Image (tube, rainbow, N blue to C red):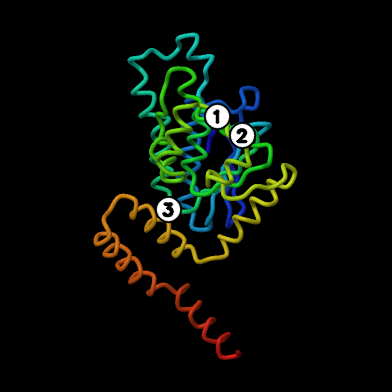
């Protein structure tokens, strides 16, 4: 599989996707967005993969869009909607459709579109030196790839607006306090701790992981009655899986020893 501008490898039950344009702090390109979508879809469809880790090579998670290209007028205003829909926004939709947990492993800056990409992931673990900035307002733009949709769900409406309207840099102590990240680790331990975090999740049955993620995202866009109807159907399916039956048998065996 040809995947320009990213590094993709699988070590079941984990898949690793790393943005790889270190000279531009992993700024987005058409090929990178296309490669990211392909890798995510491949990981989703691989029955041996349970958790996906998304990171950036070098000293940045991602600087987001290529501001130099904007300054040089390489993207005309009438092309913007097509560019967003065909590339950047398609990545957001692929991530939302991904029914396996995606963990962002963040070191260095996550700015602009890189900030949004981190927010689009299900979980975030970051180094102490990671920084965040929704920098769109600084260049007269607004978030265009899902950040303004998911950020309020992470940190609340008022805090999300403050972050987006100010365009200020958020350092790690605040990011952890407001729930923008889930765990913070020393820079030199980020890779090891991210894999450990992912393996804690990957120990669980894949069917359960998928159903839980689907249920949580279903709850964001349905009323309680509709959500309960959805999860009851999912639970009925889970009771038919061998993973569930084996787990129950194991629980009963352990309980009988107490």
Q: Decide: marks 2, 1 in contact (CB < 8 A)?
A: yes
Q: Quadrant of residue 19?
A: top right
Quick one: label 3 or label 1, which is nearer the N terminus?
3
Q: Quarter of the image containing the C terminus?
A: bottom right
- Pick the front one: 69 or 63: 63
Would you name the residue on which mark 3 appears?
99
Q: Farthest residue in the right direction?
A: 188
> Which callout, 2 or 3, points to the residue nearer the camera?
2
Residue contact between numbered discs 2 and 3, judged by CB atoms under 8 Å: no
Q: Residue at x 50, y 66 (%)?
A: 205
The residue where tag 2 is placed is 131
Q: Which residue is mark 1?
A: 111
Residue 140 versus residue 93 in the image, above or below: above
Against 134, residue 93 (above or below) is below
Dot 3: element:
loop
Tell me which residue sits at (52%, 57%) in the image.
Answer: 50
- Residue at left offset 60%, top offset 90%: 257
Instruction: For marks 3 and 1, give the one nearer the viewer.
Output: 1
Asked if 23 appears above or below 248 in the picture, the reply is above
Q: Position of residue 139 (x, y in %)?
A: 47, 17
Tell me residue 117's x, y (percent).
49, 37
Q: Residue at x 45, y 22 (%)?
A: 137
Separation of residues labelled 2 and 1 (CA atoms): 8 Å
Q: Please indicate whether residue 119 sits to the left or right of residue 211 in the image.
A: right
């Amino acid at each position: 599989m040809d995947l320009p501008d990213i590094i993709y490898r699988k070590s079941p039950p984990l898949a690793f996707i790393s943005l790889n344009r270190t000279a531009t702090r992993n700024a987005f390109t058409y090929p990178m967005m296309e490669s990211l979508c392909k890798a995510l879809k491949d990981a989703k469809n691989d029955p041996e993969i349970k958790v996906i880790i998304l990171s950036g090579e070098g000293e940045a998670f991602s600087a987001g869009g290529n501001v130099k290209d904007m300054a040089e007028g390489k993207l005309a205003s009438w092309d913007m909607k097509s560019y967003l829909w065909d590339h950047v926004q398609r990545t957001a939709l692929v991530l939302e459709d991904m029914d396996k947990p995606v963990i962002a492993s963040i070191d260095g800056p996550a700015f602009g579109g890189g900030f949004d990409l981190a927010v689009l992931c299900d979980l975030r673990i970051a180094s102490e030196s990671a920084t965040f900035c929704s920098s769109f307002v600084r260049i007269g733009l607004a978030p265009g790839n899902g950040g303004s949709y998911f950020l309020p769900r992470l940190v609340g409406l008022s805090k999300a607006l403050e972050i987006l309207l100010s365009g200020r840099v958020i350092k790690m102590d605040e990011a952890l306090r407001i729930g923008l990240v889930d765990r913070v680790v020393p820079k030199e331990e980020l890779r090891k701790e991210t894999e450990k975090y992912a393996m804690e999740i990957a120990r669980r049955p894949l069917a359960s992981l998928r159903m839980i993620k689907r249920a949580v995202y279903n709850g964001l866009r349905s009323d309680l009655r509709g959500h309960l109807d959805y999860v009851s159907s999912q639970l009925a399916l889970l009771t038919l899986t061998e993973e569930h039956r084996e787990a129950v048998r194991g629980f009963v065996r352990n309980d009988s020893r107490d």
